[in-house]
Image (cartoon, helix red, strand yellow):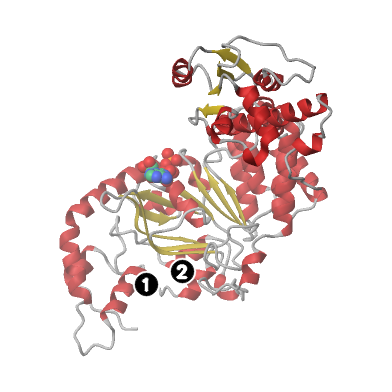
Amino acid sequence: MMRPEMPMGLIERRPPLETQQSTIWTRRQQAVCVRRAYKKYGQSSNPHVILDGLNMTVPKGCIYGLLGASGCGKTTLLSCIVGRRRLNAGEIWVLGGKPGSTGSGVPGPRIGYMPQEIALYGEFTIRETMQFFGMINGMNPEQVDEKIEFLLKFLQLPPASRPVKNLSGGQQRRVSFAAALLHNPELLILDEPTVGVDPVLRQGIWDHLVHLTKDGGTTVIITTHYIDETRQAHMIGLMRGGKFLAEESPTSLLHKYNCQSLEDVFLKLSVIQNRGKRRRSSILHDITAAIAVPETSPVPAVEALNSICDNTSEMSGEFGDSISPVPLSKRMSICSMQVNNVEMELPPEANIKMSLFDRCKLYQSHHMRALIWKNFLWMWRNVAVMMFIVGLPVAQIVLFCLSIGKDPYGLHLAIVNHETNNKTCPPTDSCELTQLSCQYLYQIELRRQVLDYFDDEESAFRAVKLGKAWGALSFTSNYSISLKERMDEGQSTPDFVIDDSIVSIWLDESNQQISTLLRRDLLFAFQDFATTLAATCNFSTKAVANPIKVND
Ligand SMILES: Nc1ncnc2c1ncn2[C@@H]1O[C@H](COP(=O)(O)OP(=O)(O)OP(=O)(O)O)[C@@H](O)[C@H]1O
């Protein structure tokens, strides 16, 4: 592909480096390759931009130190790499595939991720924690046990039977680190693993990382606030303002900027980035001119722009534009892997349409087993919580049955009994058909309701209105005579006799449940009163029973 001519001013300021082509193939050969990453938080109207066109290349077999001030977006970038978050724009290739795509193994056992925040179960012992992570990554118990011995010794951890909650903060971070190392992943992503670690152990950790990457089989990306400890990294990326200020080996950075420490390099580059921002408008003008290719040119304008962004030579030295000044070939030689000589089988490309079967494959049996095991262990360790969770519904049901499941009793009823001049009357066991209202009221009392006597209907209604009674019952003065005549005369009973034989009832309907139950009680009480009376007088009880039979 032809490159557009660069303007003279730009060439004078920055001598061009060797042109590097960035193709999908080369991106997939890297351990991690991020291109034009853009990530923001918050509303579109007021976005908080964290990654602003960031490019990052982590060759395989490399220790890559990701450095930057607190809050510059290191954790955000790492969580996009492991597939916990998504970019708003741009591309990420991890171990040849896109995070989350089918068959990429990312997230999955190909990656070991130690997050910044501790994500361990406090109730579990160190051994159980390791067993859980081992199970998730498809390891068998023997393999886990073997690895535990080494990791406990190497990371100076207490005995494996110690619960995680009883460990210090630094020890818990080391357990989290051990969990990331456990399954020998191809790519180790460590977010501040050396926080709370003494200098001797810190050196031990770095030595181990160097050992892991020696044969090129493992790649490590590590963030740390101790900038100088990254001298042992093969490459470091200095992040600021959502971009990389540089992506180079520590020695070449120290040499190039003539500094004694990487902190000084970082400061120098920050100053250059600030200057670069001020000059940016004029540089942008130069670039626009560079890609303003004539219509006759065989290179389309979009390709020309991509070429400028992807090839490291054109804009090298312009920090803050997130383009590394190191040619790709040099970066590759820093690390142990010579990609050109290796024929590798790459995972499938992203955005492949997934069938339902493929989706089901995401739910692997060892994941399910690990989760079930973890949940049972958690329940076992939290017996009190479990008893509460199981016992609460039982207690609720018992309380419900005790309070609501029973029929209500002790309900007050306002009685106006003109037949007895509102006097209470005892029930009789003789067949005298006088004061039948008393016998009916007695049946109501048997249902444990409370009878309050009133002189007239008006005062009985007032009691109901004031909520002192749930209902009012009124008997006429010749209730018993009328009822008897009604039974004797049958069809020829005059209307006024029928009216006198009726018990008038008014119920408070404000609580439908109570009024329904009360209505049922009053009807059943009358049924019992009629049956008892029939039995006392040697009548057929069946004749007075309700002519409805509910069968089984
Ligand atoms: N979920 C979120 N919603 C909104 N803002 C967020 C969220 N997560 C992180 N941020 C913001 O994004 C910025 C970058 O956060 P990030 O954790 O990536 O920084 P960092 O470089 O890892 O910091 P440190 O070195 O202190 O861990 C911070 O300003 C943070 O407040």
Say which residue label 2 marks. 329
Which residue is farthest top?
423
Q: Secondary structure at mark 1?
A: loop
Say which residue label 1 marks. 18
Near-viewer residue (422 or 374): 422
Callout 1 touching callout 2 (CB < 8 Å): yes
Quarter of the image with the N terminus is bottom left
Image position, residue 138 (x, y; %): 73, 56
Marks counted in the figure total: 2
Residue 252 can be seen in this image = yes
Q: Residue at x 67, y 36 (%)?
A: 489
In space, the residues marked 1 and 2 are separated at their CA atoms by 9 Å
Q: Is 70 positioned to the left or the right of 109 in the image?
A: left
Image position, residue 157 (x, y; %): 69, 33
Ligand 1: give its quadrant: top left
Q: Secondary structure at mark 2?
A: helix
Q: Residue at x 63, y 32 (%)?
A: 171
Q: Quadrant of residue 60?
A: bottom right
